Each structure stands twice: as structure tokens, then as C-alpha cells.
Image (cartoon, helix red, strand yellow):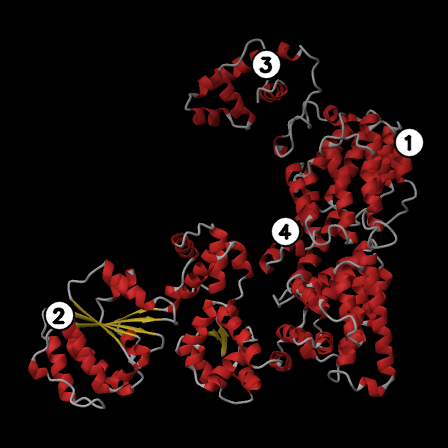
Amino acid sequence: MERLAEGVHRPLVLVNGPAGAGKTLLVADWLAQDPLPWTVAWLTAESDDDAPGLFWADVQQALRHHGLPLPHDVGTPARAEEVDRSLLVRFAAHLNGLTDPVLLVLDEFDRVTSPVIADQLEFVLHHAGPALRLVVISRTEPLLPLHRHRAADEMTDVRGADLAFTEEETAALLARHGLERGAETARLLTGRTEGWAAGVRLCALAMRQADDPDRFLKEFEAGHSTIADFLLGEVLDMQPFETQDLLLRTSILEQVHPDLANALTGRDDGEGILASLERSNAFVTAAGHGWYRHHPLFAEILRVHLRSRYPGLERQLHRTAARRLCDAGQLLSALRHAAAAEDWEFAATQFVSRLGIGRLFTGLDADGLGELFSAMAPGTPGAAAELVRAACALARYDATGGLAHLSEAEARLAAASADPAEAAQAAHPAALSAMHLSCAFLRVVAGRLLGSADMAEAAAAAAERPARQVPSVYLAQHPELPALLLTDLGSARLSAGHLDAAEAALAAAVEASASDTPGTAFSCHEALGGLALIDFLRGWPGKAEVRAREAVAEALRAGLSPARSNGIAHLVLAAVAVEHDDLAVARAELERASASCGALDDPVVAAGAAVLGSRLLPAAGDPQASPHALTGAGAGAGARPGPGGPPPWAHFHLAPAEASAHLARGAAEAAREALEGLGQAPDCVAERAVAVARAWIAGGESRKAIEVLDSLPTGAGTGPAITVRALLARAEAADRLGDAAAARRLVMRALGLARPDHLRRPFLDAGPWLRRALHGRRLPAHDWLPPERVGARPAEPAGTAQAFVVEPLSPREHEVLECAAQLMSTEEIAAHLCLSVNTVKTHLKSIYRKLSASRRGEAVRRARELQLL
């Protein structure tokens, strides 16, 4: 209404929209609520008004009826078929001479199809000048030269999209019908009708008569309703036979292209009919790039009418659409139509032979495709159908069922390859190669789920030959398949503890997914998560955090829901948070990981969760947690998908956690026993050595601990998280042997290595000896570490701490002390507190006296011990 009020000051206003959009009601309501100080004439066009003489006679009569008399010398049309041009000149001249403007509303102008009338109306509008304002209400675009009016800013448009109801407006209309249903009902109704005013109104009327309005809306069948009567009567029945036929046949499509419409009708007039329907607002709108779409309610009604008028035709139309869309490279749309036609053999063959099998694992189309193929008839024959069943099972982490279907598919492929006649029946010349490549890919997936690197390696090698034989155009259309193959190969290697080989495959997967190609987001997300886990296992939490956040960002960018994303990245972020001693973040990230698709069934994710749990439980305040509680989960982690329990690398991280739990209970011998039999895995030898050394130290064998640590190789790429723990173990051994200076040097080196990544956990777990080693030392560069754990005095016995305080500090002395704790100079303290330097010095002397300290650092340390800071 605001747009109408503003637009009426221009020569032309066009209110354009489909039947039932509320065009006429809008203009009438506007004029009633905001009367204009001008003459307003309203003319509703009739079909007879397509004759120029009748049209202009009706215009003149409308003006007279609404209070604007016309002079006799203007004249009236003498014949229905034509109008003398001089009459239009006199009519325009008379309007141009009026003092006040005249507003002429031409309603249902779509009934006027004569180009002659359009030219005459443009002539009068132009020569009448500002005295004539025209409001045209029409379902179609009028034949006026609208482009010129728009270019000159002489026109205002109110279109169907402007007239569509919003959710708030739908809620208001429901309330006026006595239906106070809430925002969700308004949202559903607005979405179902796309805001079409008549549809909202008719649904509201029907809901008011229903026993359960909410249930009525959810179960509402548009094809058998007053909405169907409205659309069939106002839209479909008004079209010629060819247009009706095209609308009915194309109603099975989500979007329709003229070529596809021609294939369904058997004619070649699709382009013209669709363009005409779009121009006439007949519930067909342009979708871009030559495609069109039906209004969803209209399409639903048309499909019901199609089944009634042409029984059995719908299935054949779906078959035709499936083949045409498949030829056009629109595989997913083709599959939906093949499923609707129950042509499962065609669907499975095209899906596999065109390398679509990876889409069941991408996290984007997986749910929809899985649901689609879940309806596939059990008796559908062929290797392709078995491959689809295998893929669906593996996508559900059912390795046993997936391998059974995969073996059947391989047997059928072997038979087809041996029989040239059967091989000739393949969907296209490269179909067998595509199926062999799909088989190899699915075996890699099975190897990953079973934790069998050998199976994955063999399958990846077997995939190389068919990959060279498959047409490059198919690989280009489905880049997710090679990316997923590399990701699953890397995950299988990671599960087996082959970190170097896993890193190579996962890095290649990221590179294959890095060009923002469709479908590769999931593999990129998962590969980055795997690389982050490798970095963390090697002791590089900073690098691990960066890659894990990249993995999470990739999932967000691709719109992957938590249930469809892999949980490794969140596990790594949780583990890094434990190293930072940020346990609240660790728990939150662990919850996100547990909500992922692989939380229970993926061996890498399950084992990672067990390892993280083994670190989080003691860090959360239970240092003497039961070793069974720490490793019991690990024993079952990953056991469901594979026969061998958790991956080997998990043992090398669970055992040190079990040993630490024993040490917390004072059981050094039990700690060493927990670490026996682990072997010497190259990627875990340093962490094992540190755990063994701590066990020897706890048992009073500090020299043996140093021998173990001396045996570690140098320059092997071990990260700071492990190196810091090794340095602290050496420092503790040195402290036990009485070499306090060496212990302090080692601790300072550990602090320097830990500082960039803020590795607090190794120092928090080190034990009370660390306080003795750093007693009295200033650590201004390490404020990232809680001071009560580093360099602090041992806790004083009850009642002795207050002996340091001669008398309480004044508020100003407390402010000075806080500044001193921040390493401010005397001059900086004076400037900060707006005091003189001498006054600050006086306060400092008083602080030293009250805290029994002789210098600033000692005063700050004692203030922290007394919890004054």
C-alpha cells in the first residue's frame, strides 16, 4: 500500500500477479483507506472490451459515472471496431487541461489483448500529461511499452512476490478466522502455499471446519479441495488443449525445460507455451537458464488431475523423464524419476556406471539417496543393484552386510566379463570399468571400517586400472569418488597405525578436494580431521588445532550437519583443550564429536574418543581414576566394526594413561607392567619411553629412567607435547638424584617449548617436585601458566600463612601491589595511579614490611601464596 501511495504520483502503476493473489482487493482497499483528492474512475474490463470502440466508450462512461463530465465536443466512438484518432486527441487534450489529476483504474486488463487498444491507451497517457494517472491490474504483462516507462522512472510495479503473504500475515489471517495456531502452523501454511493469498484463505476456511486444524494442514491433499476447484477453473480450464496437456504432463517434474517438455508431450511447442504461461502468471515461473517451475500446489493438483484423465500415463512419463535427464547429465534428478517409475534396474545401472556411488558417502546427498534406494525392490537383478546395496550397507557402517553384497556383485561382474554377450548388455561401453572401480572403492571403505589396511591397500591398487579406463567426463562429474577413495585409504592406514602412509593419502585427498568442486567437501573435511589427529598423536597440538579448525570450517562451509560430519576434528579440538587445561571446551567438543555419524562405528573416531577419555578423566580432577575405567572403553572402542578391537596406535596412548593412573595410586610396578608388551611403534616410541621413565622414577630408579630417555632418537619430528613431557621426566629424575640446577635448567627448557602452544597439562600433571625445582624463581615470560603450580611455595600448614602479614594492606597499597605483579616499573605505576614516584616508593616499602619481603618479586610471590592477588 505504501508503494501504491508513492507510485500514484507517476503516470503508470502496474499491479501484476496470478489469479487469487489479491490484486483487485489491494487496490480497492488502498483507495478506501486512503481516499485521493482527485477523481477516481474504476473500469473492470470485459472480454467484449477487446474492440477499441467499446473499450473507449466504457472508459468515458466510467469517468462520467465517477463525477467527471466530458464536453460534447470530445465525442464518443461511433463504431465498436474502431475509434477515430481525432476523438483520442480531443479526449487527451481535455484531460490535459484539467486542474486536478484523474486516476483511472483498469482492472482485469489481461482480458484486453488488442495491440490497437494498447497503442491508443499509450497515446492518451502520453498526451494527457500529468493530468492522467493510470493503475493497471492484470494477470499478464500488458502490451504497453513498459520498458520505456521503467527507463524514464514513470512507472511503479507491484508484482506477485510483493503480494505474497509473509508468515506474520498468514498468522494474522488465521487469527481473523478464529485459528490462533502459533508460528509453526503459519510457517507450514505459508510454505505450502508460497504465500498465495487465495490458497491461504481457502486453507483457513477448510481448517476452521476441521476437527483437528493442525492435523488437517499436515494431511491436506490439495488435489481434492476447494483450492483445486479454484485453480482448475481459473487457470487450467482457461487454457487451450495443448497448454493443458503440457501442464499435466510436466507436473511430474520439479523443474521443466522446453526440451524436456517436448519429450513428454511429443510436440515441439514447449518453449512458446512455457514462456506464455510465465508471462500470464499462470502459476508457472522462470527458474533461470531456460528452466521453469510450477507452483507446488498447482503441480500437486495437476498430478491428481493427470491420474484421473490419463490413468497409467504418470509412470511412463517418469520413465521418459529419467532417460532424458540422464542423457543431460542430471543423474540425481533422473534417479528420482526412475524410482517413481519403479525402474530400479535402470536406476542402479545408471547410478553405478556413471560413478555416482560415492554420493552415498558424501554427507550431502547421502540421506536422500539412501532413502531413495531403500525402496529398491529386493529382486532387482544385476551387479549394479548389488553394488548399490553394498554401498548403502557400508554407508550405515555395516561392514558385514556390505561385504556380502559386494562379493555377490564381484561374482556377477566376473561372470559378465567372461561372457561377451552379457557384457554387451552394459549401459554404455565403459560401464564394466565403472563397476569395477566402484567395487574397488567399496572394498577400500570396508577395509577402513574393519581397520584392515591390507584390504584397503589391495583395493586401492586394484582401482588404478579401471580408473584409467573410465571416461574422464564421468570422473570430472564425480570428483568425490577419487577424493573419498584417498580419504578412506588414509583412514585405514591411520587405523592400522601407519601414520606416515596415512598422512600421504590424507594430504592427497585434501589436494583432490581443494578446488571447491561439488561433492568433495565431506572428504576434505574428513581428511583434514585425520591429518589433525596425526599431528596430535605426534605431539604437535598447535598444528593439530589449526587443521582441526580447518576441518570444522569446511563442514560449515559445505552445510554438513553434525550428524553427517565426521567427529575426528572435534575430538582433536577436545584433546588440544585438555592440553590447554580448558576442560569446559574439551567436554563441549567431545559432545560434538559424539553427535557425529562415526562416533560409535568408525574405528578411528571410537578409538580417538577412548584415548581422549583416558586423558580427560584424570585432568577433570580424578588423578587416581581406575585404570579399568580408563582402558575399559578403549577395549571396546572400534571393536564393533572390526574384529581386532581398537587400532594399534590407540594401545600406545591408552597404556600410558593406564600407567599414569597406577602411578597416582603409588603402584609403580603395576605402571611398568601396563607398559610392557607394547613393542616399539615408531610413531609412539617417545610417548611410551616417557611413561616408562616416570614409572622408574616413581619406583626410585631415577638412573634407569634417564637411561630410557637417553635411548630416544633425536630429530625424529617429535612435537613439543611429547618433548616437554620428556624434559619434565628428565628434570624430575635429576631432582630425585639431587641435581637441582640441572632440574631447573630442564624445566626452563620445557617452559620455553610449551609456551607457544600454551601446553599447561604437562606441568599440572608433573607433581609437587616441580614446585621445589622452581621455588623462588621469577617467570615473567610464562604468565600463561597458573602460578600456583609453577614456582609457588608448598602449601603452608594451617595457621602459619598469616604470620607473614604484619598488618593488612590498605586499598591503595593493594593497587600498587597489583601493578607490581604486572611487572610495571615505579614510574609506570605512578602514571597509572596518578601518584608521584616518591609516593609509590613509600607504598612499596610499606608492602615489603607487611609481607616480610625484601624485594618486589618476593612480595608478589608471597601475596599470591596468601591469595591477596
Numbered circle sitting on residue 67:
2
Numbered circle sitting on residue 642:
none
**Along the horizontal axis of the image, is 122 left or right of 191?**
left
Residue 335, above or below 2: below
Name the N-terminal-most of marks 4 and 2: 2
Please state which amino acid type lies under the numbered disc 4.
Arg
Q: Which residue is mark 3?
A: 851
Please state which amino acid type lies under the numbered disc 3.
Leu
Q: Give whichever of 18, 709 is nearer the camera.
A: 18
Q: Tell me the SS state at disc 4.
A: helix
Name the N-terminal-most of marks 2 and 1: 2
Please state which amino acid type lies under the numbered disc 2.
Gly
**Along the horizontal axis of the image, is 205 left or right of 144?**
right
Q: Residues within 10 Å of mark 3 (few under 14, many from 20)?
A: many
> Label 4, label 2: how many angstroms apart (C-alpha)?
73 Å
> Label 3, label 4: how many angstroms apart (C-alpha)?
47 Å
